[in-house]
Image (spheres, helix red, strand yellow):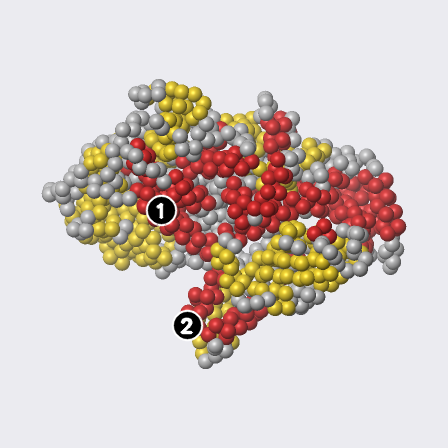
């Protein structure tokens, strides 16, 4: 007998309820007055609050008209006489739209309308029975979330205007709508059990039976609400467990599917909406991050900023997150992350008199091991970041509330909430949060952020109404609404039950962001060190009597900071965001170069002796490196001193024939494409190269929807053919450098690989000039090393991290692509191979092989990503001893920080053996600040010869010392008062 | 400014601002063919947008053209 599945075709209770609910919703508005006097002026935003208008004046906007233009801003106005019957009541402006609107009434900011909220209360702003409405609207093509999927159907650059109206609200209906939404979510999510679902469905059906839906009357609606109150909220049959803290928050991407210039309005709209909710709900609090967003509000909307300051002072509006922006926390250097805290905290202190005690980074793509120390020394005790719990693709991160121990042993309290940072406060989301919470035995609550995010907007009335009902739902976990700061203090401070995670917070996803948009990474690294030089040289000039260009440097630094935002520097954004970033970088570079100025002699800005082969611009030389003519010279410059450039050398030192090169250090057999078949070290009498060494590889790279973000683990199964167009040949030779060149082709791209061998250096430099014309490709360079090792060591800029190269467990398997900074190293006892880079961050390693990611070519969100010319160098550096005794970190600093032309004299201590990470004028202008970093994992003392103030990273004085004691990977900040 | 320049230098930045991409393919008489990628490739309202571009071209260059849009949508994005 055939199996026939019995399908119920008659209407279920919950379906009947849903049917009636849709009818009920239509009665939320008790009075409606259509506004027929809208006018519109379309524009295109070209700068912060700067617009180019398509029309010379406004034109009428009628229901059914098409409005908005691609990337357009619309200015909409209407003058309305308050209709009869509305006076003395609360009434709202209602517009159903996919756009984001800031609403002013009679010159005052009333609030915001967007896809998540269609009304704004306007009655308090009426004057003499009149409403002059002004709307600034930005049409968004990308929804912030999928909560309102119906918006997808109207998504696009051009919209149909559905009209606007003034409405009054039937609060009884609205309340029942909220009850129904809440209860149907609880019943339908399945997380509270079948019995509870059946109970709610039955009782809700009974409540709705009290209403005649042919003639919905308020008395019946109120009766239904009373029924629900008594029979559902009043029931304690179904017991819940758990404790969940609810914190209102809106994650705001400074740039993503929109440019930073639009975020000025996104931020205003978000802040306005939250403040208006605070006006309505006295218990409501909200957390907002990023000093930069407060700065823009202060700059462009001072009257709103004044109101905000009051809300902050009263504790309603919470300033969260110590940093200037929410930066990527993999790629920025230690000094950059310190500046994020310094500039953020100083702004908050100056404007609001507060030091924020948390780092609020819900959306960043993993977190470097160097962060805990930086946070602790920047006044931050608590760290919050969501991604590892919700986005890991392989392993469940084992903690939510824990202690995070950093590279130097510093510890912060860490919260990685179990659920996404965007939620709409549904019972299902809260229950899911508690169920997923892994640290129940620590006695802590779990954290649930609620509010729409990415593009801002935040909490809604609906979410707060739900929150007020949670206490009456016995099946729910116990909830409380609190601030982020209170939550962290209450649950972490002194909690002895917390477990410790010692290591980086690696995100098992978004591994492509170490590589995507290579030029941004290159600029970021370059400017980080250029800013260091500019500050150092400015301090030296100041000591000679010149003025310190504080504003100029800070402005340049801020451009660098802003573009470290976690959807800018990682490369996950649309084309105009990329172009904006490049403009910022060019401007910052120009300013910093202007600060450094010109000089007749080269100055070594390193605080250690520079003994390395260095490229020096020289128009008379035949060598061209990164588009600049010059020559390679062996420099020997004292720390923080000027030095002379040696004259060109003449020497017979190099032999090259049939692909075999002989230098004082090596005998090398090259393949035609420039990869190395044999690298025999004459000095150390050993072979370095395995099967594929300096081998270019290109793979098909199609990670799916998260194109710019992800690399999938199977990319290596899809190699792309590489053809050699011109085999390696000698193109230049002088007394110091021999230059070999090969031309290769991959798909639509040409690569010029220039290999440089030196008479006085063990380093082998490879310059890659690439015309990259690919889609969905990943380029790497591979090094199979003739070593026995099971780990790869990577620079973090504040010490090194060792990662296993075997694939024993899922944890190693998931780390198939990781982040490095200036160098990585693969060593066995007594010897190893370092790879020093200028601007590459992605590296993968298996057994005794590693490969550096060079270029990607995603097409989403930016179809033009990474296309064009790239020119980048790296240095292969085989060495005896381990990477510390071989001084690899210093070699990498030498490589990244060339001497600058500046006629300055230094009387600064060199602080050896610590790395002088930064020298600057303090923010208050009273001290010279020195930032020292121990990078080799040692402890010891430095006697600088004079006393210094001991500072934290916010430049607060914490003591005084004339002997610097340092511990492994410690970052020390000292101050010297200016006399 | 000819049509290709206008599309690439005036229209393209606007579409890119919404995550879209447009490139000039060719012209036959008054019919101009453009390739649409990124968000444009899956836009439900593309026809409205093409009409707007035609209007902009007419207002700014005086030329009346008809746009023919070819969508190039990534295979991994079906919405």
Q: Which residue matches tag 1?
A: A591
Quarter holding the C terminus of chain A? Answer: top left
Q: Identify the residue at the far bottom of this view.
A: B29
What secondary structure is marked by label 2? loop
Residue B16 in sight: yes
Q: Relative to A955, does residue A763 appear above or below in the rendering?
A: below
Q: Nearer the viewer, residue A265 or A39?
A: A39
Q: Which residue matches tag 2?
A: B1
What secondary structure is marked by label 1? helix
Quarter holding the N terminus of chain A? Answer: bottom right
Residue A933 in sight: no
Q: Relative to A686, does residue A112 appear above or below in the rendering?
A: below
Q: Relative to A275, does residue A638 appear above or below in the rendering?
A: above
Residue A351, percent across and down?
54, 37
Residue under the point 78% across and 41% down: A196
Subunit under mark 2: B
Residue under the point 58% across and 69% down: B48
Residue A834, percent across and down?
31, 37
Q: Is residue A682 left or right of residue A362?
A: left
Subunit under mark 1: A
Q: On the image, which quarter does residue A333 sit in?
A: top left
> Which label belongs to residue A123?
none
């Amino acid at each position: 007998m055939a199996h026939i599945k019995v399908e119920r075709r008659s209407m279920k209770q919950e379906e009947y309820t849903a049917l009636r609910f849709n009818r009920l919703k239509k009665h939320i508005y008790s009075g409606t007055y259509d506004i027929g006097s809208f006018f519109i002026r379309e524009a295109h935003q070209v700068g912060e609050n700067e617009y180019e208008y398509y029309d010379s004046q406004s034109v009428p906007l009628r229901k059914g008209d098409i409005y908005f233009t691609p990337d357009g801003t619309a200015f909409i106005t209407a003058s309305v006489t308050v209709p009869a019957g509305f006076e003395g009541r609360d009434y709202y402006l209602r517009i159903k739209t996919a756009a984001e609107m800031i609403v002013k009434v009679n010159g005052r900011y009333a609030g915001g309308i967007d896809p998540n909220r269609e009304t704004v209360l306007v009655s308090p702003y009426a004057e003499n029975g009149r409403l002059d409405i002004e709307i600034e609207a930005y049409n968004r093509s990308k929804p912030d979330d999928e909560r309102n999927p119906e918006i997808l159907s109207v998504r696009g650059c051009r919209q149909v205007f559905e009209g606007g109206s003034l409405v009054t609200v039937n609060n009884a209906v609205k309340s029942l709508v909220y009850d129904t939404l809440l209860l149907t979510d609880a019943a339908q999510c399945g997380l509270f059990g079948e019995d509870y679902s059946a109970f709610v469905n039955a009782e809700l059906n009974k409540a709705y039976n009290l209403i005649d839906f042919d003639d919905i009357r308020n008395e019946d609606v109120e009766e239904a609400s009373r029924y629900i109150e008594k029979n559902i909220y009043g029931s304690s049959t179904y017991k819940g467990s758990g404790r969940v803290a609810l914190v209102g928050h809106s994650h705001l991407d400074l740039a993503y599917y929109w440019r930073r210039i639009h975020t000025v309005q996104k931020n205003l709209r978000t802040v306005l909406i939250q403040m208006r909710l605070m006006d309505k709900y006295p218990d409501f609090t909200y957390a907002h991050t990023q000093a930069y967003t407060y700065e823009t509000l202060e700059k462009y909307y001072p009257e709103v900023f004044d109101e905000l300051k009051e809300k902050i002072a009263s504790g309603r509006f919470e300033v969260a997150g110590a940093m200037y922006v929410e930066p990527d926390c993999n790629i920025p250097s230690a000094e950059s992350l310190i500046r994020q805290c310094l500039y953020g905290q100083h702004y908050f202190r100056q404007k609001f008199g507060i030091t924020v005690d948390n780092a609020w980074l819900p959306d960043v793509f993993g977190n470097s091991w160097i962060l805990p120390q930086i946070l602790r020394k920047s006044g931050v005790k608590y760290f919050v970041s969501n991604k590892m719990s919700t986005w890991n693709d392989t392993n469940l991160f084992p903690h939510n509330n824990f202690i995070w121990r950093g590279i130097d042993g510093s510890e912060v309290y860490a919260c990685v909430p179990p659920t996404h940072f965007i939620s709409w406060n549904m019972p299902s989301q809260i229950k899911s949060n508690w169920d997923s919470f892994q640290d129940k035995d620590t006695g802590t609550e779990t954290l649930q952020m609620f509010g729409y995010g990415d593009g801002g907007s935040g909490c809604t009335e609906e979410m707060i109404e739900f929150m007020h009902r949670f206490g009456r739902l016995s099946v729910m976990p116990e909830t409380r609404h609190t601030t982020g700061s209170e939550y962290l203090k209450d649950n972490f401070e002194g909690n002895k039950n917390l477990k410790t995670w010692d290591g980086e917070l690696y995100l098992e996803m978004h591994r492509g962001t170490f590589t995507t948009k290579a030029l941004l990474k290159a600029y970021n690294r370059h400017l980080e060190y250029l800013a260091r030089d500019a500050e150092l040289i400015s301090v030296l000039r100041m000591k000679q009597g010149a003025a310190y260009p504080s504003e100029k440097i800070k402005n340049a630094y801020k451009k660098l900071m802003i573009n470290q935002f976690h959807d800018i520097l990682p490369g996950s954004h649309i084309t105009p965001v990329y172009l904006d970033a490049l403009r910022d970088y060019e401007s910052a570079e120009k300013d910093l170069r202007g600060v450094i100025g010109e000089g007749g002699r080269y100055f070594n800005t390193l605080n250690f002796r520079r003994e390395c082969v260095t490229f020096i611009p020289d128009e008379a030389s035949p060598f061209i490196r990164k588009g600049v003519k010059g020559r390679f010279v062996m420099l020997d410059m004292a720390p923080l001193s000027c030095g002379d450039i040696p004259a060109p050398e003449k020497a017979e030192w190099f032999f090259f024939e049939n692909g075999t090169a002989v230098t004082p250090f090596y005998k090398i057999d090259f393949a035609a494409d420039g990869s190395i078949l044999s690298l025999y070290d004459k000095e150390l009498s050993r072979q370095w190269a395995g099967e594929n060494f300096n081998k270019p590889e290109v793979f098909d790279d199609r990670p799916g929807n998260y194109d710019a973000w992800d690399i999938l683990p199977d990319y290596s199964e899809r190699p792309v053919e590489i053809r050699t167009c011109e085999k390696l040949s000698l193109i230049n030779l002088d007394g110091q450098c021999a230059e070999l060149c090969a031309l290769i082709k991959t798909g639509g791209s040409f690569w010029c690989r220039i290999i440089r061998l030196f008479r006085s250096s063990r380093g082998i430099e490879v310059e890659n000039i690439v015309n990259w014309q690919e889609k969905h490709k990943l380029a790497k360079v591979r090094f199979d090393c003739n070593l026995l090792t099971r780990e790869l060591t990577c620079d973090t800029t504040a010490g090194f991290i060792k990662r296993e190269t075997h694939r024993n467990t899922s944890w190693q398997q998931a780390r198939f692509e990781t982040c490095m900074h200036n160098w990585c190293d693969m060593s066995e006892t007594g010897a190893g191979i370092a790879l020093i880079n200028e601007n590459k961050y992605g590296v993968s390693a298996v057994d005794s092989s590693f490969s550096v990611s060079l270029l990607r070519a995603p097409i989403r969100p930016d179809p033009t990503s990474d296309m064009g010319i790239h020119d980048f160098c790296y240095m292969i550096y085989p060495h005896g001893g381990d990477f510390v005794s071989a001084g690899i970190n210093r070699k990498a600093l030498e490589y990244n920080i060339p001497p600058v032309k500046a006629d300055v004299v230094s009387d600064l201590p060199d602080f050896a053996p610590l790395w002088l990470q930064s020298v600057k004028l303090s923010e208050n202008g009273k001290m010279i600040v020195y930032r020292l970093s121990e990078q080799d994992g040692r402890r010891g003392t430095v006697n600088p010869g004079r006393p210094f103030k001991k500072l934290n990273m916010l430049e607060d004085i914490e003591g005084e010392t004339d002997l610097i004691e340092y511990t492994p990977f410690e970052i020390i900040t000292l101050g010297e008062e200016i006399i | 400014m000819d049509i290709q320049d206008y599309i690439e230098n005036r229209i393209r930045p606007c579409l890119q601002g919404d995550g879209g991409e447009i490139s000039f393919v060719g012209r036959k008489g008054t019919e101009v063919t453009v390739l649409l990628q990124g968000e444009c490739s899956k836009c439900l309202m593309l026809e409205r947008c093409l009409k707007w571009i035609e209007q902009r071209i007419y207002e700014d260059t005086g030329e009346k053209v008809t746009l023919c849009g070819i969508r190039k949508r990534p295979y991994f994005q079906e919405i």
